[in-house]
Amino acid sequence: MALTHNSKVSDHEPQWGDWIKANRKHLPANAFAIGNPQKRSSLRYPHHWIKNGKDTDGDGVWDKGDMYLHVGGLQAAWKYAMGAMSGKEAPQEVIDHLKRHFKAIGIEKEEDFLKPYVEILKTEDEHKVVKGVVYAAGYVDTDGETMTPEDVRKMAWDFLANRKEKNIDIQHDWKESGCIVVESYFLEKSDGTFPDNSWIIAVKCTDEIWEKVKKGELNGFSFGGYAEKYPKKVLVEVAKTIVGETEGNLNKDIIPEHQHNYVVYVDKDGKTIKGITDTVFDHYHVIKHGTATETELEHNHRIDLTEIME
């Protein structure tokens, strides 16, 4: 099967970080948002993955398999395109390209681009069952708030314990829709489709609601309720932030010479907590020690935190 650029999403996409690290070198040019196919180092903003990829002509790049849009990869590409690491926005053609993909999967507003993607699965036509995330811990919701994993777990468990399987309304109209929850569980570790620490439900729809799902008029779940808010004083220990620039890479045969800007967080004793560089040539480096970055694309960079901290 030819690898055609598309916006098709798989129900079971792999974890993006691990997959792209292992397979980026095999991706064809049309899996990226920009770059010269004849110059691999110029290919940037990958957002597709390939299932059962095969290289039939021996050049190391897959030319057979099933290409899918990777939602996690699309969200990562959007972060980088907005300057999350470099502080500079990507060219407009990149931004427009990524926006078209978001629109194709039913996400119209930019403020929703980085929210947990909740595609209602439409594969169980016979049973008219849809499945998705109600709430994922750690993600900021539309009220600008979030919940802990413990709170999300309790909410998921209490929903069933209190026999609320029929409490499914439409667009928060507080009226029972006739739909019923047939699965409800707390997912501690991501299964490749849904994020860590999320409440997942499957709902059997009425004929009327199922038609709206198929037409794309209903695309996800949202829970409704009441909350009592109160102020609370907390003690927060803030890590020291160090900003700098790496040295150039030594093995220039692998990738052209370049440097990265980086941010490193250290504790009160000066020990490195974590760090990360910006994205250059479509890659970045994690920093775990104060002397060099971790290896990525077969190279790393020296850094020196001692001079900055003195």
Image (cartoon, rainbow, N blue to C red):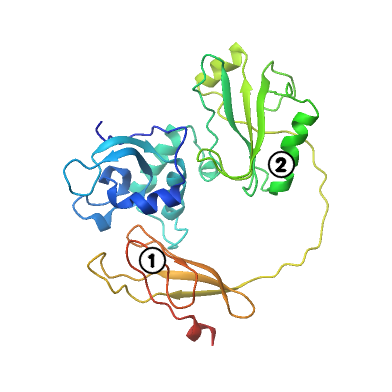
Residue closest to the eye, 89 or 131: 131
Q: Label 1 neighbourhood size at 10 Å, few (<14), some (14-19), many (20+)?
A: few
Spot occupied by residue 201 in the image (x, y as percentages of width and height) = 64, 30
Q: Quadrant of residue 278?
A: bottom left
Q: Quadrant of residue 51?
A: top left
Give the position of the C terminus as an image quadrant. bottom right
Label 1: element kind: loop
Q: How far apart in space, not on screen, are marks 1 and 2 (Cα)?
A: 37 Å
Q: Is residue 98 left or right of residue 148?
A: left
Q: Which residue is located at x 82 percent, y 56 percent?
A: 231
Q: Is residue 177 left or right of residue 16?
A: right
Give the position of the N terminus as an image quadrant. top left
Q: Is residue 240 left or right of residue 281?
A: right
Q: Which residue is located at x 45 percent, y 78 percent?
A: 291
Q: Is residue 20 above or below residue 280?
A: above
The reply to whether residue 78 is in sight is no
The numbered dot on residue 295 is: 1
Amino acid at the residue labelled 1: Thr
Label 2: element kind: helix
**Who comes first in sequence, dot 1 or dot 2?**
2
Which residue is label 2 attached to? Answer: 153
